[in-house]
Amino acid sequence: MNAVVDIVMTAYNAGAFLPETLAAMRAQTFSDYRLIIVDDGSTDETPRILAEAAADDPRIEVITQKNAGIVAASNVGLERCNAVYIARQDADDIPDPTRLERQVAYLEQHPDCVATGPLARHIDEHGTVRQNYTTNRRDTALANPYWIPAREPYLMHPFLMVRASAFHQTGGYRPMLGSEDSDLYWRLSEIGRLYNMPETLGSYRIHSGSISSNSIGHGARLAFCAQLAAISAQRRREGRKDLEFTDELMQAVKREESVRGLFALGCQFVEGQERDWLEISLAAKIIEICFYRPFEPTPDDARFMAQAFGRHWGLMSAENAKILRESIMTTAVRLAIKPGYRQQGFILVGKGAWPKLLGRAAFRTLLPTTLRDRIKKTVKGPAPA
């Protein structure tokens, strides 16, 4: 008899975290599940840990393969799924005991919903909770592939649960270099409603970033793929031929280090006004992710972004433009006061905004924190009753 939930986990050299994650799975209050774990060519203690876990718990099925990457490993596990619901679980994250129970209950009670994810607290490599850090709850109904940058229908992917029928209808994951989840969510949202639960039902592990993962090249690649996924969604909405995301395209993306080079690559696959939208939206997405990752643009990247904003500003609504203008200024201020990046900050905003940039940079660097906070509160006014 099939389980109600099939859980797919991929593991690559996750031996340091697997025991805690597997213990949390055994502690779930909802027990009618099967845990399908794909060992993606691990060379550490992962194979031994998984073999012992499978021997102790008949609900655990282990598949071993040569290293092929997270998308290929995920799809191998997903091919084995035959339950009503499919859940994702990362090998290094920790589900709360009621995670599965709460998600199954919501989907059972809301047949119009095809996928759901909870909030998650952030922990570090050692399991220490990062104070005041949880994932932001986003309204998936506000998703808009035409917004600049695209407003994605975000769900917490490491704790995703989806109706198997809807997942298989989408065709599954496509190679998208960090945007496999948002590409899937765009397609799921065309089938039914997505829902972000208000409950915190897990711990999401934040690893200290390597130099490569924090580089502007990596950030630009993430931004590029996210906007291609949005163009793909635009095409489906308009009844046009969808983009094809291939392993060859992703290899070409991995070889590009500059924002300008990525845009040139994208122009080979998009056409007409899509190119204008991709140019400004790629620049805007990099501005957006600079808020939470240390992606610092090179002077040439900054020039490309400033030129994109200048050429295509008219593609946005007044509300979109207002939000993006403030985001650009905030990023420019951060760059202007960071040693070695002042030039990029001034390039981003253009000469007309230099006085404002200088004023805000001075506000950030010259005034004591307590005085800055008092001024901010005064400007914002009292909180609504």
Image (cartoon, helix red, strand yellow):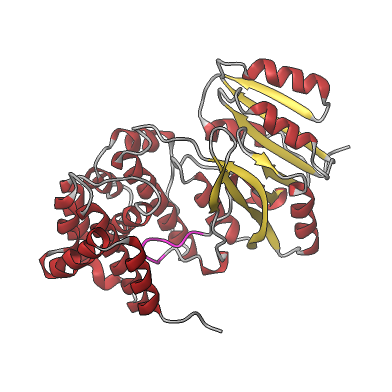
Image quarter (top left, top right, bottom left or bottom right) of the C terminus: bottom right
**Image spot of residue 49 (x, y percent):** 69, 19
The segment highlighted magenta reads 146-152
Quarter-of-image position of residue 351: bottom left
Q: Is residue 287 left or right of residue 238?
A: left
Residue 71, magenta (yes or no): no
Residue found farthest to the bottom: 385
Above-or-below relation of 368 to 173: below
For the question of whether residue 241 can be seen, the reply is: no
The residue lying toward the viewer, choosing from 288 and 164, is: 288
Residue 149, magenta (yes or no): yes
Quarter-of-image position of residue 332: bottom left
**Image spot of residue 196 (x, y percent):** 63, 60
**Image spot of residue 10 (x, y percent):** 61, 31
Image quarter (top left, top right, bottom left or bottom right) of the N terminus: top right
Residue found farthest to the left: 351
> Which residue is pictured at 70% across the width and 21% down the height?
50
**Image spot of residue 93 (x, y percent):** 62, 38
The residue lying toward the viewer, choosing from 249 and 290, is: 290
Q: Is residue 321 left or right of residue 377?
A: left
> Which residue is pictured at 28% across the width and 60% down the height?
280
For the question of whether residue 354 can be seen, the reply is: yes
Q: Is residue 365 left or right of residue 94?
A: left
